[in-house]
Image (spheres, grey):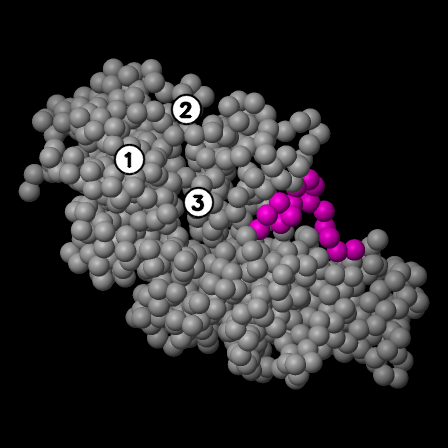
């Protein structure tokens, strides 16, 4: 089994970087934050109530941010806040207060695209680091140097930047470079798309994106259709990024922060993806020469995948293989089914919070941080009080399942769906 | 100081430049597509020099488009190009990428700089940020409405440029999306090039009346708006708030069309300036554009009177 992404000619560039990169994960809410960090993220990025690009996400209150920061501190992890909109005049008032509140909540950094937010943070909340968002579509080293000279410690590059270009940038500018290594991608230059504004009057650069690039379109040339009946329609929708096959190259070229996309994604998705990259990064640093991609990681990654995967612009410019023509089908044949709350050594029963319908006789998998993993069939299932059940049908219901091996709180249970 | 707004038009060739100047343009926007995005035509360096000399003779300004998203490979040529533009005597450089700002500081001291990142130039405070770093003009995003334009003008000391006519870009990708699609269908030779002359457009099932032009060039794939902005009828609203520059975007239009558009906007501006109180919009101005307008493309107010949500 492969992710399908490892077939391109490998990058043969600079191979001497050994500083340990940061693994940066998305967290759409407090629970996801805890799972991302528990599964190995060095830092998470979240959205607050304002100035972020995911207006449909749960998004954190300042109180939740404080709780998130407290949780992160226990693991030595950091919390960043995405303030990555392009502000309109009416958004400008209020930026100061918002940024001061972030600083007071213990947030380590903001991710910003709009200079008004960057400059205001530097002025009123100096303890907040400012990281330049990918929404600025920064691809060249002189622009990176400009932002360094402006006092920014980190730039998130455009997703269009290749390994060679990253190497060139690192060669010229001593600055932290963050790159997206996993998840869904804009097929446009980030920020340079107002399809949502035109189709639905929703402002994409203030969080209203309705993903019109993934819609299907008919193409015409001089009024003649460029498709025959029954053929796939035109789309701009991209496959999702997955760089697990090229992890040594990412480390050696000197990317300082490995960013996973997906503030709207599930706990199961985030924890699974973080878990795999965490193990791979740790394995590399334990033995760079002997590092090998493990099949188990690839299999795990595929169990969380929402779409077919590719390598974006790292190795070459995406071509016909890198888009999703035809119907979009969920790629992973697994569904998240429960979270372990507790485990009783004496009885061998795990207490679970149900996250999806599952039943006796069903094949399930238990997964924990560091790659702990086993499969079993659900044989014994009870409710909280011990009454025997044949199915766990209620959302968030507390149930007990006999497990083949010991499990720990925050381990996940997933079920096979096909 | 007397209010003298500028009428700015895009030129695709020296011929169009001449005709637009004669039709009443105060300034023209040109460039090389290696450095400028979505130009209506390509100007070589020789042509740029000639354009400057033609324009100077008529008291018209030439603005050079250097507003691409710049990659490492383009940097070296960029510095040389900026030095050339300075030497050639263009009147301003239009930039989006900070690398261009830095190159202009190094090779074109004193050159007026117009900040234009298209859809992301959305607030006065960020305009002021770029002003403190050398920008002299703020080119407003076309997705702003009248209220936001007025507010920006009242809060900014910068020159304010607003597009009042023509199509706008709504999506820019580095990918070759049309050719990728044809490759996917196994017919890569059907459209050897998908450039802006080819008349390609895309349509979405729920919006059968809207045709979105799409083309590919050295900078990737571009999708354009399905209607053309036309603010002629309400130009006095923008004149009343002293917008400094009115841009007519001529991409994917004939010279005849652009010439007529420039001509009637010139009439409207001059009529307003001669007598702001007594100014009346003349329906025949608009009729003369309608006669040349592609019947499948609506003339619209763009986002001028829209509220957006998010």
* Same chain shared by disc 1 and disc 2: yes
Task: Answer with left or right where residue A407 lies relative to residue A72.
Answer: right
Which percent across, then down, holds residue A285?
62, 82
Q: Nearer the viewer, mark 2 or mark 3?
A: 3
Residue contact at pointers 3 and 1, CB within 8 angstroms: no
What span is in magenta?
A318-333
The CA distance from mark 2 to mark 3 is 29 Å
What is the crowding at mark 1: few (fewer than 14 residues within 10 Å), some, or many (at least 20)?
many
Q: Chain of mark 3?
A: B
B188 relative to B95, above or below: above
- Identify the element where label 3 is drawn: loop
Would you name the residue on which mark 3 appears? B218
Q: Nearer the viewer, mark 1 or mark 2?
A: 1
Q: Chain of mark 1?
A: B
Which percent across, then down, holds residue B167?
38, 33
Verify whether residue A321 appears in magenta. Answer: yes
Q: Chain of mark 2?
A: B
Q: Which residue is at 43% across, 30% downward?
A: B197
Which percent across, then down, holds residue A174?
40, 75
Q: Quadrant of residue A387?
A: bottom right
Residue positioned most to the front: B46
Would you name the residue on which mark 1 appears? B10
Relative depth, front residue between B277 and A153: A153
Which is nearer the N-term, disc 1 or disc 2? 1
A145 relative to B69, above or below: below
Q: Which residue is at 41% across, 39% downward?
A: B169
Q: Which residue is at 63% across, 61% downward?
A: A9
């Amino acid at each position: 089994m492969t992710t399908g992404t490892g077939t391109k000619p490998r990058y043969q560039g600079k191979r001497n970087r050994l500083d340990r990169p940061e693994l940066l994960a998305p967290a759409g809410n407090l629970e996801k934050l805890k799972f991302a960090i528990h599964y190995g993220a060095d830092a998470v990025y979240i959205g607050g109530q304002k100035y972020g690009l995911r207006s449909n996400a749960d998004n954190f209150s300042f109180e939740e941010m404080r709780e998130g920061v407290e949780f992160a501190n226990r693991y030595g992890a950091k919390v960043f806040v995405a303030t990555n909109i392009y502000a309109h005049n009416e958004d400008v008032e209020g930026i100061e207060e918002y940024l001061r509140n972030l600083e007071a909540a213990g947030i380590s950094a903001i991710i910003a695209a709009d200079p008004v937010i960057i400059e205001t943070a530097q002025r009123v909340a100096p303890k907040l680091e400012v990281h330049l968002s990918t929404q600025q579509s920064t691809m060249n080293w002189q622009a990176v140097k400009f932002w360094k000279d402006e006092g920014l410690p980190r730039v998130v590059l455009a997703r269009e930047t290749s390994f060679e270009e990253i190497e060139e940038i690192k060669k010229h500018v001593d600055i932290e470079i963050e790159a997206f290594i996993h998840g869904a991608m804009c097929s446009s230059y980030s920020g340079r798309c107002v399809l949502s504004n035109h189709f639905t009057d929703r402002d994409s650069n203030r969080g209203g994106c309705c993903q019109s690039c993934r819609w299907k379109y008919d193409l015409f040339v001089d009024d003649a259709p460029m498709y025959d009946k029954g053929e796939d329609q035109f789309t701009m929708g991209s496959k999702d990024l997955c760089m697990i096959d090229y992890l040594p190259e990412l480390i050696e070229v000197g990317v300082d922060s490995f960013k996973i996309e997906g503030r709207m994604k599930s706990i199961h998705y985030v924890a699974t993806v973080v878990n795999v990259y965490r193990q791979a990064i740790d394995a590399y640093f334990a033995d760079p020469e002997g590092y090998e991609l493990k099949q188990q990681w690839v299999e795990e990654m595929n169990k969380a995948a929402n779409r077919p995967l590719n390598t974006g612009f790292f190795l070459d410019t995406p071509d016909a293989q890198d888009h999703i023509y035809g119907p979009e089908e969920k790629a992973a044949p697994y569904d998240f089914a429960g979270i372990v709350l507790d485990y009783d050594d004496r009885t061998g029963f795990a207490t679970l919070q149900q996250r999806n319908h599952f039943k006796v006789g069903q094949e399930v998998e238990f997964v924990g941080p560091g790659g702990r993993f086993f499969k079993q069939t659900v044989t014994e299932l009870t409710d909280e009080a011990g009454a025997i059940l044949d199915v766990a049908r209620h959302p968030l219901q507390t149930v007990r399942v006999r497990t083949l091996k010991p499990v720990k709180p925050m381990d996940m249970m997933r079920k096979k769906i096909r | 100081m007397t209010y003298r707004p500028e009428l700015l038009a895009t030129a695709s060739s020296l011929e169009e430049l001449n005709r637009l100047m004669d039709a009443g343009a105060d300034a023209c926007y040109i460039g090389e597509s290696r450095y400028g995005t979505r130009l209506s035509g390509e100007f070589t360096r020789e042509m740029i020099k000639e354009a400057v000399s033609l324009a100077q003779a008529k008291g018209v300004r030439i603005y050079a488009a250097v507003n691409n998203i710049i990659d490492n490979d383009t940097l070296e040529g960029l510095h040389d190009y900026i030095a050339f533009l300075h030497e050639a005597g263009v009147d301003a450089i239009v930039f989006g990428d900070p690398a261009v700002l830095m190159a202009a500081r190094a090779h074109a001291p004193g050159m007026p700089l117009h900040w234009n990142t298209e859809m992301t130039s959305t607030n006065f405070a960020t305009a002021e940020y770029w002003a403190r770093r050398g920008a002299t003009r703020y080119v407003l995003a076309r997705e702003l409405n009248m209220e936001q334009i007025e507010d920006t003008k009242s809060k900014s000391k910068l020159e304010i440029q607003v597009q009042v006519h023509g199509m706008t870009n709504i999506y820019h990708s580095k990918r070759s999306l049309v050719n990728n699609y044809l490759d996917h269908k196994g017919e890569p030779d059907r459209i050897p090039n998908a450039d802006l002359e080819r008349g390609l457009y895309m349509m979405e099932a729920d919006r059968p009346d809207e045709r979105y032009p799409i083309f590919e060039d050295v900078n990737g794939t571009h999708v354009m708006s399905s209607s053309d902005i036309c603010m002629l009828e309400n130009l006095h609203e923008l004149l009343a708030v002293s917008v400094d520059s009115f841009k007519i975007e001529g991409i994917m239009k004939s010279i005849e069309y652009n010439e007529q558009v420039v001509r009637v906007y010139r009439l409207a501006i001059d009529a307003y300036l001669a007598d702001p109180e007594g100014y009346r919009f003349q329906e025949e101005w608009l009729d003369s554009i309608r006669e040349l307008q592609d019947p499948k493309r609506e003339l619209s107010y763009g986002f001028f009177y829209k509220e957006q949500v998010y």
